[in-house]
Amino acid sequence: MRRSSRKGSALVAVIWLLAVLSILIASYAVDAHLQTRINIYLRERVTVDHLTEAGLAIAEVILTDYQNVSEAASDSELEEKLEDDRWYTEKLSLKSQGGKEVTTGAVPVDALNPNGGTVSVTIRPIESKLNINNLYAGGDQNFGEIWMRILAVSGIPKDYWDGIVNGWCDWRDTDGTTTGGARSENAGAENDFYTDAYQDFVDGRDVEKNKNYKPKARDGEIVDIEELKAIKGFNEYDEKPINADAILNGGVLNPAEDEKDQIVVTNGISAFFSLYGSGKINVNAVKDPRVLAVIPGIFQGNPDDQRADDVEEAMAIAQKIIELRETLPTDGKSPLISSSDEENDTGAYKDFNNLQMRLQDVGLDIQNDASNYLSFQPDKFFEITIIGKSFGIVHKIVAVALVDGDKVRYLRWQEDP
């Protein structure tokens, strides 16, 4: 009986031992599997990082040399140029199309290993919006008119205009004088206004998101359009909170009011602005007709009158400018071959005279004032988007670059935004 009991105990012990060993072996197997997957991921991550580095080199080659390429005169010359320069197409597109977005498509970096991953490079001239940092008294003498046109086209009621513009001017300028008069309800605000009590007053303030905002005016260039939400005039009217996000991106401007009294902004003002650029709009790069519609000489009425007809007329001209620009050549030639059409009445605009002539052909006209705000070639600021892909892993870089001759300087850099 004892011997049988001992055998039973030994059997139980062996079973427990086997169970423990099985668990250990299984855990080691899982750990080995995970470690293998981690090693594979790290290897592929290194590969995809190399791909984006290659994409960055491709972007810099295009940007520093596109001004030096010339259009081919024939199909045979085009073939020669493509053989000599792998990126001839992208360079010429950036130059001849006056600043439209160009992309390489998905390119295998290693021609001998097409499955080793791809990289795509997209280059977009930034001068397709207004540089907001120029739109104040120290930057553009017509800043007030342009702001009024922006607010009119955006559908923001006139009562709010002075508070918005005055608040912006005091935030941007470097003096200590309150714009609009210190006692006016629509006056701007200097540093003594932006106290903790004011921050507590702002309705819907996301404290965590805005934790880096200083409790005072910027007194210089802003670095994020979202910063406008911190400014007096954007988040209060007549000492009552308003929705700053509605001014920027559209929405209900005064959600605290009764529904019948609420004001809906269909289009926010953020669509008009960039943080970089010369202050001119590249007419061959701009995509949003609203941006063109607010340019002096295109918007030909007085925005202070708030006439809907003036806004509609400006929008009609802006839309036609983009429509005519998108009309492709009809001579049957490749867009990479020089056209025999000397008048250049299709495709990208050559200069301001060409723009005026093509508009007049369709019964429209713009005033010469517009020439001070329009450009027809890329300037110096570009947005570069690089996407590397390898075995399901994606690495994306979005950067803002300043190109000066053969040098590229990065002003903003985001990875996997």
Image (cartoon, helix red, strand yellow):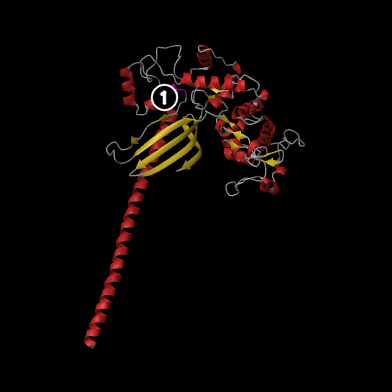
Q: Provide the major secondary structure of the magenta segment.
A: helix
For the question of whether residue 223 can be seen, the reply is no
How crowded is the residue under tag 1: few (<14 C-alpha within 10 Å), some, or many (20+)? many
Task: Report which residue position mark 1 lands on.
Answer: 93
170, 325: nearer the viewer: 325
* Amino acid type for the residue under numbered disc 1: Ser
Q: From the top left corner, tell me how far across and down residue 267 is, in percent.
A: 57, 32
**Which residue corresponds to the image point at 71% horizontal and 43% vertical from the top-left?**
193
**Which residue corresponds to the image point at 29% horizontal and 61% vertical from the top-left?**
29
198, 267: nearer the viewer: 267
**Which residue corresponds to the image point at 55% horizontal and 32% vertical from the top-left?**
271
Q: From the top left corner, tell me how far across and down residue 4 is, in percent.
A: 22, 85
On whether residue 20 falls in the magenta region, the answer is: no
Q: From the top left corner, tell me how far across and down residue 282 is, in percent.
A: 52, 24
Q: Residue furthest right?
A: 183
Residue 392, image quadrant: top left
Residue 102, image quadrant: top left
On whether residue 97 falls in the magenta region, the answer is: yes
**Badge count:** 1
**Which residue corresponds to the image point at 58% horizontal and 33% vertical from the top-left?**
268
For the question of whether residue 13 can be seen, the reply is yes
Q: Residue furthest bottom?
A: 1
Q: In the displayed structure, would residue 404 be above or below residue 354? A: below
Image quadrant containing the N terminus: bottom left
301, 145: nearer the viewer: 301
Q: Is residue 128 left or right of residue 11?
A: right
Q: Is residue 284 left or right of residue 370?
A: left
Q: Is label 1 in a helix, a strand or a loop?
A: helix
Give the extent of the magenta segment. Answer: 93-98
